[in-house]
């Protein structure tokens, strides 16, 4: 039987002792000094997804399967909010009243931080036993593995993703048809489409310089000139990054060219992602480079016929796994927790993600009946097949999001040259890297 309750962390926080000490995690899947398998009667799950979301629907089915296979176990689902878990996880997980498995954000500053502090159970043994490493491409595994310093990409498994997200191009089919334009397959063809719209008096790209979208467009252009080696240098600190090398220079100069050519509206420096999305949905702009998270809203609100394609010519793309399932070090039903995680990767659960537009990491796009959902999933699968997920431009160091936004706004405003923008990006990146690595 499943019990679902909406929980805040207030009660849990109230009973914690004033002095909290993190336990130290063991290696290879053993977990911390506390917890383990002392309770085989209850599985407690924390997550923050709505019941009608793709994740909520898929996980509800995973719970049903778990209960069918473990009728003796009571499943308790506690609904948190993203903000509650993000802000309070480190405090709550030092206590004894913790979930057995919970949804948590991926990355150095989140899952990596908890892992480095011994608050999460290493899942490497479970990953090997269940074949997760064979099922998930390397670019998905990156967000699941963290080293002793909490840096992603290496070391033990501390989390498991079961859905994904990526950035592509949404386009207005009716506006394309009016000019007799085809979907571009190379960057050169994409630029020809941009020019055709501009020549017809239409600004081609919906953009937002005040938030994340412009940075993601810039990073797609970086990736257009890059290989996996540069991604590892930039995201994982595999070696030093040359910000004035050919990859980032070409991308920044190309974006500058597009701004000067009028492919990006001059007022976009002050626009938000919401402004961008609404302007695309209402038909002001024919294209929008942004994430799969817009899919459901565009389906619901856009009246004109529309479609999607991956950023033309790129083998590498902006995107990553979704959030992770993690097992707290103090959990008392760890074996049940890893069984539940494994169920979420089964085809019958992954196919629910697919049908609901949730981008499964191990689903079958051919089973999807809705044309647009199938197109989205096939585009994502093409990226996975090429192991092309390359994360987000602001991920490497804390506070880098604001730096990227500010620097690229200067490019839109034409108050800085591409070289000056790269100088600003490099300075903040190197300072943040030094802080993280202690050098």
Image (cartoon, rainbow, N blue to C red):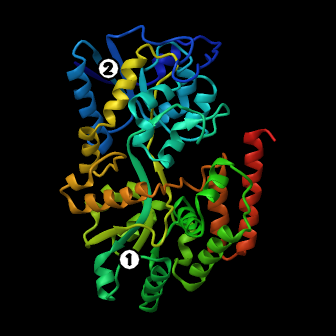
Mark 2: which secondary structure?
strand
Residue 200 visible from this viewpoint: yes
Q: With respect to residue 40, does 417 lie above or below?
A: below
- Mark 2 and mark 1 lie on one chain; the one further toward the N terminus is 2
Q: Tell me the residue that label 1 is attached to.
A: 286
Residue 53 at x, y percent in the picture: 30, 44
Question: How busy is the neighbourhood of tag 1: few (under 14 within 10 Å), some, or many (20 plus)?
Answer: many
Front-most of residues 290 and 371: 371
Separation (CA) of disc 2 from disc 1: 46 Å
Residue situated furthest right in the rendering: 439
Residue 51 at x, y percent in the picture: 27, 37
Is residue 301 rendered to the left or right of residue 160? Answer: left
Q: How many marks?
A: 2
Q: Residue at x 62, y 61 (%)?
A: 405
Q: With respect to residue 82, does 10 lie above or below?
A: above
Residue 76's label in the rendered image is: 2
Question: How busy is the neighbourhood of tag 2: few (under 14 within 10 Å), some, or many (20 plus)?
Answer: some
Residue 304 at x, y percent in the picture: 26, 73
Q: Residue at x 54, y 71 (%)?
A: 268
Front-most of residues 318 and 44: 318
| Marks 2 & 1, CB-CB < 8 Å contact | no
Residue 271 at x, y percent in the picture: 52, 66
Residue 215's label in the rendered image is: none
Front-most of residues 312 and 293: 312
């Amino acid at each position: 039987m499943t019990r679902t309750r909406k929980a805040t962390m207030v009660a849990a926080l109230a009973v914690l002792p004033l002095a909290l000490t993190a336990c130290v995690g063991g290696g290879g899947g053993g977990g911390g000094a506390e917890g383990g398998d002392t309770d085989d009667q209850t599985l407690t799950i924390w997550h923050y997804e709505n019941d009608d979301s793709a994740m909520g629907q898929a996980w509800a089915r995973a719970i049903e399967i778990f209960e069918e296979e473990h009728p003796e176990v009571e499943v308790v689902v506690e609904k948190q909010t993203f903000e509650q878990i993000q802000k309070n996880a480190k405090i709550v997980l030092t206590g004894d009243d913790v979930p057995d498995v919970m949804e948590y954000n991926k990355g150095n500053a989140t899952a990596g931080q908890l892992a480095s502090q011994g608050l999460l159970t290493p899942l490497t043994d479970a990953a090997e036993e269940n074949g997760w490493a064979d099922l998930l491409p390397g670019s998905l595994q990156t967000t699941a593995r963290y080293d002793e310093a909490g840096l992603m990409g290496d070391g033990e498994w501390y989390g498991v993703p079961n859905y994904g997200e990526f950035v592509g191009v949404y386009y207005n089919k009716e506006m394309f048809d009016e000019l007799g334009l085809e979907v571009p397959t190379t960057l050169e063809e994409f630029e020809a489409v941009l020019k055709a719209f501009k020549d017809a008096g239409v600004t081609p790209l919906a953009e937002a310089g005040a938030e994340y979208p412009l940075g993601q467009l810039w990073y797609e252009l970086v990736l257009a000139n890059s290989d996996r080696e540069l991604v590892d240098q930039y995201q994982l600190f595999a070696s030093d990054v040359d910000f004035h090398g050919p990859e980032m220079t070409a991308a920044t100069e190309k974006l500058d060219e597009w701004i000067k050519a009028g492919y990006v509206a001059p007022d976009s420096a002050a626009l938000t992602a919401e402004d961008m999305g609404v302007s695309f949905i209402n038909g002001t702009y024919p294209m929008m480079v942004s994430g799969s998270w817009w899919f459901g809203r565009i389906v619901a609100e856009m009246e004109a016929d529309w479609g999607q394609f991956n950023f033309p010519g790129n083998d590498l793309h902006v995107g990553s796994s979704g959030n992770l399932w993690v097992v707290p070090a103090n959990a008392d039903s760890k074996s049940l927790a890893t069984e539940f995680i494994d169920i979420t990767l089964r085809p019958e659960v992954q196919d629910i993600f697919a049908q609901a537009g949730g981008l499964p990491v191990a689903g079958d796009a051919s089973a999807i009946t809705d044309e647009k959902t199938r197109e989205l999933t096939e585009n994502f699968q093409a990226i996975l097949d090429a192991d092309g997920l390359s994360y987000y431009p602001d991920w490497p160091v804390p506070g880098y999001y604001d730096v990227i936004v500010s620097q690229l706004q200067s490019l839109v405003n034409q108050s800085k040259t591409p070289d000056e923008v790269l100088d600003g990006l490099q300075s903040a990146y190197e300072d943040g890297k030094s802080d993280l690595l202690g050098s």
